[in-house]
Image: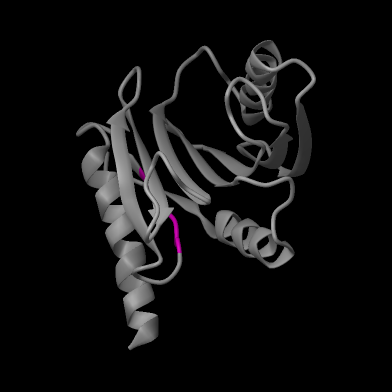
């Protein structure tokens, strides 16, 4: 019964993401967040240019007070950012402008159409110390971001390994044309 629950929860996340994305978006993201009941949808919003941002927290937390946070973002691909490398460089510039010298970056893996990296930011701009794993996946029409964040200097080693595995298993599902 437990494997079925995990599969159903994964299917729920995929369907929720698909239903929230603009109606004419042909791609969705397959991503397994884990067992049912571990995470709850805490916030959702539209993104500039047509897209979706969904934030999940552990049971007992909320979007304003969390210890762990998973964020899934879906943006329409634009000519402004042409590759995962270019996206990462733009993010680095934004972090540096907001908090000079406060963020350390580490690329874990990259290919032509995706990048997996982590960053650590010291307390800055009224935000606590934070570490984050991120995978950026470029599809034909969309760019997907997966984030796993903790409010600490380091990830617990088992959590880091688990989330890298989950992010690497995420895949873009092409839509019908």
Q: Nearer the viewer, residue 78 or 31?
A: 31
Stretch of the chain drawn in magenta: 28-33
Q: Quadrant location of residue 158? A: bottom right
Is residue 7 visible in the rendered image? The answer is yes
In this image, 53 relative to 156: left or right?
Answer: left
* Residue in the foreground of this view, choosing between 117 and 131: 131
Establish if 137 lies above or below 48: below
Left or right side of 1 for 136: right
Position of the N terminus, as image quadrant, is: bottom left
Magenta stretch contains residue 142: no
- At x 41%, y 52%, the residue is 57
Q: How is the image coloured?
A: one colour
Check the image and name the residue furthest to the bottom.
1
Q: Please, is residue 75 above or below residue 99 in the view?
A: below
Q: Position of residue 64 (x, y in %)?
A: 40, 39
In this rendered view, identify the residue nearer to me: 137 or 4: 4
Give the image location of residue 79, x and y in percent.
50, 14
Give the quarter of the image for residue 31: bottom left
Q: Residue at x 62, y 30 (%)?
A: 84
Q: Please, is residue 83 above or below residue 10 in the view?
A: above
The quadrant in which the C terminus is found is top left
Q: Residue at x 42, y 32 (%)?
A: 142
Query: How many numbered marks, from 0 up?
Result: 0
Q: Position of residue 56 (x, y in %)?
A: 39, 49
**For the point 66% across and 26% down, which residue is it?**
88
Any part of residue 29 in sight: no
- Give the side of residue 74 with respect to residue 163, left or right: left
């Amino acid at each position: 019964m437990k494997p079925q629950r995990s599969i159903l929860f994964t299917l729920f996340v995929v369907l929720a993401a698909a239903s929230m994305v603009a109606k004419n978006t042909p791609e969705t993201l397959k991503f397994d967040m884990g067992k049912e009941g571990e995470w709850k949808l805490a916030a959702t919003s539209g993104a500039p240019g047509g897209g979706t941002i969904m934030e999940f927290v552990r049971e007992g937390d909320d979007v304003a007070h969390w210890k762990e946070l998973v964020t899934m973002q879906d943006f329409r691909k634009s000519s402004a950012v042409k590759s995962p490398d270019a996206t990462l460089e733009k993010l680095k510039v934004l972090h540096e402008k907001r908090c000079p010298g406060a963020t350390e970056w580490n690329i874990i893996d990259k290919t032509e159409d995706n990048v997996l990296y982590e960053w650590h930011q010291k307390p800055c701009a009224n935000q606590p110390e934070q570490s984050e794993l991120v995978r950026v996946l470029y599809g034909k029409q969309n760019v997907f971001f997966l984030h796993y964040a903790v409010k600490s200097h380091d990830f617990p080693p088992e959590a880091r390994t688990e989330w890298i595995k989950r992010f690497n298993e995420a895949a873009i599902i092409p839509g019908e044309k």
